[in-house]
Every structure is written in structure tokens, then in C-alpha cells.
Amino acid sequence: MDNKPKNFGLIGVAGYIADRHLKAIKETGNRLLASLDRFDCVGKLDSYFPESDFFVEFERFDRHVDKLKRSGVQLDYVSICSPNYLHDSHIRFALRHQADAICEKPVVLNPWNIDALQEIEKETGRKIYNILQLRYHPVIIDLREKMAAGTAGKKHDIDLTYVTSRGHWYQISWKGDVNKSGGIATNIGVHFFDMLMWIFGPVVFNRVHLLDKNKASGFLELENARVRWFLSIDANDLPPSVREAGKRTYRNITVDGEELEFSEGFTDLHTVTYREILRGNGYGLEDARQSIETVYQIRNSALSVLSGEYHPLIKK
């Protein structure tokens, strides 16, 4: 890895997840030259890169990056933390300016967007990386190694339950618009689906039992697993013990009846991801393809009747 500091731009700097990207850029010893967001509540920059330039208009940001390039200062990477439906456009911006793109999940909303972006990678010689941070979680890595060493061809039984409460604001924001976020399964579930397919293999078939603006549930058969999944932003789906403890998030995965404990260790995974990208080992478009295809199928599937295997919470 070249030890010379790299030059970064960042799009979507006012958003929640941008903090982890700012932290990762700083902790890997690099510098943020400029950032963009239509909202100007970005005082967080003072804690990371107070000298960096900030823009609220894309056109001025674009002009500034071009001006930097013409003065001999090249962006090496553009980090993309913008709303999901804008990822495709902002990735294209990065590659047009001869920078590699580091994009939050989901990298795009539709499978065919991946094909188009791969063509632009070939044309520009630049690279698109996706944040698939769960692949770097020590517990997940251990599980993958354990499963790889297990009995070949065995089907494991998995329950995935993820409830992350959101207030009324959620449906008013872009996240509540399925055309902009991809809906619940895409916005809060895509990295879990990616993780499960990374460990247990590709999808054999995909059945959806529930799909609305607040929750979704279904059944995935993977090459080496049967997965009952339930995703929700409705606080009423939290277990009573979690609500009584004043918590608003519940994350639970069981594998063959054994709970997988990985509630800790999330906050530094972006920095780990950046280190790997800077070494040339990051995950690219093809790595993201299966999960993008899966969530696309989920949001475009007809609902199945409750026969066979389904998540126990769906009866509630």
C-alpha cells in the first residue's frame, strides 16, 4: 500500500453514515479535500477535516473538483453516502473525474445498473468498491470458516430477525419512498442478505410472505441453508424485554438453533473496510451482485401463501 496520503471527496456528508466514512478517512491517514450535501448541518467536519471545502450545490462541487484536477490536484477516491437512488449517478461522477468510488450499501438499486457501471469501469480504468462491512466482522468470519470446515452439502437452518425502530420521519424522508430507497428489505436488509450468501452460497429460491412500508418477511433457500427472515422498523415488533430495557433495536441470528452474538464491533468496520480498499483488496461490483439481485426480487415478488417455512413473527 502506498503510504502517501490519498485525496478524498465525499458526497452525502450530512447523513448519519457519513460519520463512519469521515472517521475511516482520518484513521487511515488520508485527507478530505471537499464534500457535498444539499443540507448544511455539517458541523461534524470540524472534528475531522475543518480545512476541507464544502458545497451544497452539485454543480459547484463538480466545478471545484474539475478546478482541482486542472491545478494538478487529483481526487483518488470519492466516498458516496447519498440516498440509495443517487448512488449510480454519483459513482459515475467519481469515475468521470478519474477517481475510484467507495459506495455505501446498496451500491445500486437494480441488477442492470451493475452491468452498466462495469462498462464504465472498463472505459475509465477506475474501480468501484462497495461497503460490505459484515464480511469483516470477526464473528462472521469465524462462522464462515466453521461452515466451510463442516459437512459438505449440509443444509443449515437460520432465523434472521432485525428490528430497528424508526419514527414517523422515516416515511416522510426518501427512505420511505420505495423508488428511492428500494424499500425495507433493501434499505435495512441488503447487508444481512449479502452476509448470508457469502457464508452459505447462492439463492436457490426466494419466497416473500410479507412486504409493506414498515416490515418485510420471507424465506430464502440458499445452497447450504434455509433462511427464515423478518425485517422491521416498527417498534411494536421489539421483544418485550428489549422495550422494557429502553432499547430500540433488536438484532438476532440463529444458526441451527444457536444464537450468533455479533451485536458489538460494528463501529470500526468501515475503517477496516477502507484499509482493505487502500490495499487493493476491497469488494467490488461483482461481489455485490447477488444481494442486489435478491432484494430486487423481494420487492418485485408476489406474496406467497403461508405454507411451508416462514418466520414465526409473521403470525403476529
Image (cartoon, grey):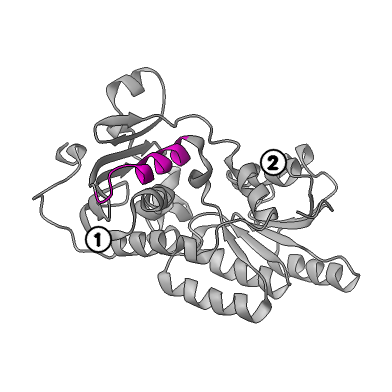
Residue 5 against residue 75 in the figure, above or below: above
Q: Is residue 272 above or below residue 88?
A: above
The magenta segment is 139-153
> SS class of the residue under badge 1?
strand
- Front label number (1 vs 2): 1
Residue bearing the label numbered 2? 23
Question: Looking at the picture, how far across and down is residue 10, in whole percent?
Answer: 69, 56
Q: Quadrant of the C terminus?
A: top left
Q: Which residue is mark 1?
A: 204
- Of residue 31 and residue 247, the one placed in the foreground of this image is 31
Q: Residue at x 70, y 54 (%)?
A: 278
Is residue 54 visible to the viewer in this orientation of the structure?
no
Q: Position of residue 288 (x, y in %)?
A: 47, 61
Q: Residue furthest left?
A: 307
Q: Is residue 51 left or right of residue 209?
A: right
Q: Mark 2 or mark 1, which is nearer the start of the sequence?
A: 2
Mark 2 surroundings: few (<14), some (14-19) or many (≥20) residues within 10 A: some
User: Is residue 32 inside the magenta stretch?
Assistant: no
Residue 150 covered by magenta stretch: yes
Q: Is residue 180 above or below residue 146?
A: below
Determine the residue positioned at 50% across, 29% down.
264
Which image quarter is the N terminus in? bottom right
Is residue 165 visible in the rendered image? The answer is yes
